[in-house]
Amino acid sequence: MNLLKKGIWDILFFIIVFSSLVFADTYELQSPNKRITIKITTADKIYYSVYHDSKPIIAPSSISLTIGPGVVLGKNPKVKKTRTLSIDGKIIPVVRQKNAVIINRCNELSIFFKGNFGLVFRVYDDGAAYRFILNMNKPIKVINEEVNVTFADNPYIYFPTEESFFSHQERLYEYILLDSISSEKFSSLPVLVDIKNGPKVVIAEADIVDYPGLYLRGNKNTTLTGIFPGVALKEDTVDLNRRGGDRSIRVLEYADYIAVTKSKRNLPWRVLVIADNDIDLVKSEMIFKLAKPLQLKDTSWIKPGKVAWDWWNFNNIYGVDFKAGINTDTYQYYIDFASTYNIEYIILDEGWYKLGDLMAINPNIDMEALLAYAKKKNVGIILWVVWKTLEDQLDAAMQKFEDWGIKGIKVDFMQRDDQRMVNYYHKVAKEAAKRKMVVDFHGSYTPKGLRRAYPNVLTREGVCGLEHYKWKSDLSPEHELTLPFIRMVAGPMDFTPGAMVNAQKDDFKPIYRRPMSKGTRCHQLAMYVVYESPLQMLADNPTLYMREPECMTFLAKVPTVWDETKVLLAKVGDYIAVARRNEQEWYVGTMTDWTPREMELHFDFLDKGMYTAEIYRDGVNAHRNGNDYKRIETTIENGQKLKIYLAPGGGWAARFIKRN
């Protein structure tokens, strides 16, 4: 009976919606290849719907913007004029996350309404997007933005459930039916929708400036509805004696509006990445294409690279003649390691300063000596900071960092994306760029395109990454095989790979001070090719890396930026094989979940000629001991096929050097 009632109400809902559209004006926009169509109707409200190969995938979904009591932009809208535009160009990214050249081709429709507002729609060959544009006479208070995504059927969805707006956005993905999600349950972005007998759709947003982040809640039907954190009226104070101390600055009171912003501006893009197959999800660069263009005049100083990281491995170096810890000797050891393998940076993570005061250096660290040593060894230093301490001491701290010659900052524990916090990200990006510093945002929301405007923002967290193995058992290779298809669609992710202690499922234990990873050694090596992060960590300790010279042969050479990307094989949650080129060298990374697999790789992406292939494959006993691997050298040529075997939680990685 309940199902019958639900079905009746669903039918009535669609009857009401469609009947309201009978007398509507309709506008249509197609992708350049004519496979994706977005239809916009203006009736009692503004509705959009999306078709893929003439099949409806998004049913009519209403959108509006409330900017005051009774002032709803989109209610009984009156169209003044429209404008169409075809965009066909190239973007040359400063930091080459996937490709050295990004083809930017789409069709655009702008609809201008009475009331000094409009909507811009874009349709690419791999998706669609829309945004509100405002042309008011005075600053506005946005009470709410109505965002709805109504699917034409009841698909499964990969849903990263959140508990509150105070979040690192480090989530696992629940694979559940859309109509099972209640209004009490909501998620951060992006989410992946798996349409039966149709494409996959990633819901995301781009170009978020002076505005809060978007979340999606369920409705026990086939509609996802947007919700936003309100403006922060009252925040918690910093109390270093309280649990959470300086890093749990929660919003104690939210306003009943989501933004106060300027009168003439564009709101963020609401994005649907539409992919025929799983391979196309990994290839997508829609978020970057929709983001604000480059805002920096000089970018020559921005230097991607790898980073020797101290925190995950708890500074557990050994075989040395000094006490390991947060001290000068230990960090000089990291610098020596980085210098030996031409690693660009080391990070000084938590402990280098007295919490609450960036000017109070740990007395066990001779900062001047350490900086001089790093400069002599041509290794850059990146400093970890808690966001609130940096905000409170921004000018003085950044000036001090610049005087020291610091190359970058890792800003942590924001855990929010209300309007005030979004603005903080932009401020930090600008201030760092003024001083020629790169930025890594941790404890952050997922990327929305800031890196295009400020390419010194090389990476960010917002991902349930390797660090969780220190204290949790629910991470797995399955989770790691969802990330390239969902989280990575939004932008680079600081997963922090590189574990040198690798365990099969039954042997794994979370050990905070001596951590390990699930899966095999080659699973970890492959992440350096599969996972995109122009600032890529080496998470384990230098002692272990130096005891693994074969692995370091690969890790020392693998780039963090790419001129060309080819996705060879892919299935969400199961396996992936990616080939990437940097200059004349190709790299391939392949990963599997807990299912052992035999796969065939086709090397038709290589240029004609012969290549020396340095291959890292799971050892014959990797199913018993995740540390087991074998390195071999062989010859590969264009068009050749090769069968490879991956152990449970396994991987395969290779470097291809063209022979003269």
Image: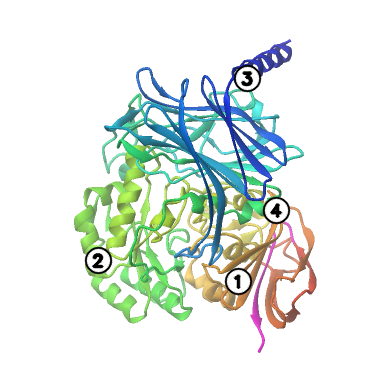
Q: Viewed as shown, does residue 429 lie left or right of 510?
A: left
In which quadrant will I find the C terminus? Answer: bottom right
The label nearer to you, 4 versus 3, is 3
Identify the residue under disc 1: 581
In which quadrant will I find the N terminus? Answer: top right
Query: Looking at the image, which is closer to me, 1 or 385?
Result: 1
Per the rendering, the mark at residue 402 is: 2
Going by the picture, which residue comes out furthest to the front? Answer: 81
Q: Is residue 218 visible?
A: no
Answer with mark 2 or mark 1, whichever residue precedes in sequence: 2
Query: Looking at the image, which is closer to me, 556 or 125?
Result: 125
Query: Label 1 to label 4, Cα distance in Å?
Result: 25 Å
Helix, strand or loop under label 4: loop
Query: Looking at the image, which is closer to me, 562 or 625?
Result: 562
Going by the picture, which residue comes out furthest to the bottom? Answer: 660
**In the image, residue 63 lies in the stretch drawn in magenta:** no
Identify the residue under disc 3: 22
The label nearer to you, 1 versus 3, is 3
Query: Label 4 to label 3, Cα distance in Å?
Result: 49 Å
Query: Label 1 to label 3, Cα distance in Å?
Result: 52 Å
Part of the protein shown in magenta: 647-660
- Classify mark 4: residues with Cα within 10 Å, few (<14), some (14-19) or many (20+): many
Query: Label 2 to label 4, Cα distance in Å?
Result: 44 Å
Answer with mark 4 or mark 3, whichever residue precedes in sequence: 3
The label nearer to you, 1 versus 4, is 1
Q: Is residue 384 visible?
A: yes
Residue visible at 49% across and 72% down in the picture: 543
- Classify mark 1: residues with Cα within 10 Å, few (<14), some (14-19) or many (20+): many
Answer with mark 1 or mark 4, whichever residue precedes in sequence: 1
